Image: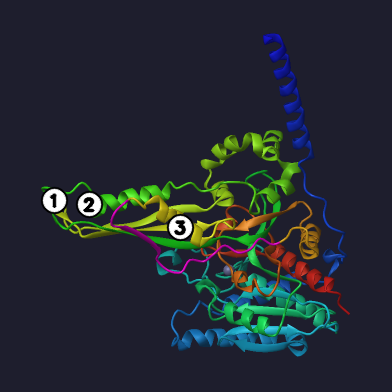
Amino acid sequence: MVRLLLGGLVALAAALAGFIGYRTMSFTAPAPPAAVEIAAAAAYAIDADAAAARLAEAIRFRTVSLVSDDDAAGRAEFERFHAWMQETYPAFHAAARRELIGGLSLLYTWPGSDPAQPPIVLLAHQDVVPVPDDTRQNWRVDPFAGELREEAVWGRGAIDDKGSLVALLEAAEFLAAQGRRPARTIVFAFGHDEELGGEDGAVRMAAALKQRGVRAWFVLDEGMAALSRHPLTGAPAAMIGISERGSGTMRVHAVGQPGHSSMPPSETAVSLVAVAVDRIHDMPIEQRLEGGPALGMMRALAPELSFANRMAVANEWAFGPLLRQRMEGNPAARALLGTTIAPTMINGGVRPNVLPGEATAMINFRIHPRDSAADLLRRARHAVADLDGVSVDWAEPPREASGVSSTSSSSYALIAALSREILPDAPVAPGLVLAGTDSRHYAEVAENVYRYQPILLSAEDLEMPHGLNERLSVANFDRMIRFYVGLMEAGAMQ
Ligand SMILES: [Zn+2]
């Protein structure tokens, strides 16, 4: 009987091993959808040095996001930037309709010859984050001088996001100057307050498009790029953002009996808020590959993964706990797999020997696409339901995660094909954008919203946007222009 049982177990183990092996071997990138026609973008006669000089000029306009409505000098910088665009890109401005929306945002419509085809909507933003005075000395150049050195354009906004904006204009001018016209309408939406949330720019431009009945083929914005060393594979990978996380801050409030601390009650406002924060911090959060871009990313990078990693992700049903354990210690992986919870502030009491009447804490959530703000709040309240005197609310209206765009659409295939054309060594994979972009406001304008700049960045380069010594290599700027020309041509230029 024992022998029979053992025999059965061995057979079962062998079958299981076979199954795991089969799943591992068959875990590969899904076949791309029907091949898309793309032009040989590498062959365009782009003068990258001349274009880079124009990007340097664009950086000299100090278009720092306007925090006050009556910042006349700040507005004037944006207006001068607008005038520069009109002077510098005359053929495009002659071909496209230009509208000012929300004060300083620019919405261009380059009408296609075939109105029956859904348009393409291309986003970039004009505004940049400031350079704080205490960081200025750590820049190797004046951040607003627009210097060209070491084969790169230096300055605030070089990557985020004037590089995109100017590359789009360069691409459109390149085509328009040849008298070419798209078959499909192309909309360019250049927000002026992306770094502040896009309420006056992107929100209004998206509303205008929606009101006009625009239902785009796709929307493309900044958000991700090609990495020279993907953390999972150690090799290049072009990451196309197909979703972005939401965020919100929960305020935990506890009331207690105020008085002297010599004969305290069993719980004080401080002990209550501490327990509540601990419970919410520890509440179970789903950490999985499925339900976001993670699984698609793993699949797309499967050929580059080590066998052990490929086996683990291909057989999440068996290795899930192991996988989660390995990823627990890696903040980047955790951010990809699930909502993250970070207690950030705690406040209460004024003296060591006085019981405060109340105490509060703030807990910052970054919301994964599988979770909703309402559900997270419900679960947080449930976690502290038995704590008398504790209440939990969103401190401000939270921002939900965006939807997850398709990786089997014709537009994803187009973006991927162009990326491979421009960056042949970087396999294309979908990714989750950890920050926020203007594109989240365009969910009703297109079913598929992608976030990708076709530039190759190192881990060090990723620190540049919003950081020090921001710069874009001329080679990367050249890639962007070629990519956008290819994108516009794929809309069937005439
Ligand atoms: Zn940006």
Mark 2 secondary-structure assignment: loop
Is 440 in front, or is 226?
A: 440
Q: CA distance from mark 3 to mark 2?
A: 24 Å
Give the magenta part as a residue range. 387-405
Marks 1 and 2 close (CB-CB < 8 Å): yes
Disc 1 under 8 Å from ligand 1? The reply is: no
**Going from the N terminus, do you reach mark 3 or mark 1 first?**
1
Residue 303: horizontal and vertical position, in percent? 76, 42
Q: Is residue 9 above or below residue 222?
A: above
Q: Nearer the viewer, residue 274 or 5?
A: 5
Establish if 209 lies above or below 422. below
Determine the secondary structure under disc 1. loop
Q: Which mark is residue 268?
A: 2
- The residue labelled by disc 1 is 261
Q: Quarter of the image holding residue 439?
A: bottom right
Q: Is residue 213 left or right of residue 338?
A: right
Q: Residues under labels 1 and 2: Cα distance?
A: 9 Å
Q: Amino acid at mark 2?
A: Thr
Is residue 374 in view from this perspective?
Answer: yes
Can residue 83 be spotted in the picture? no
Residue hosting label 3: 378
Give ligand 1's quarter of the image: bottom right
Is residue 58 rendered magenta in the image?
A: no
Q: Is residue 402 magenta?
A: yes
Q: Which callout, 1 or 2, points at the residue further toward the start of the chain?
A: 1
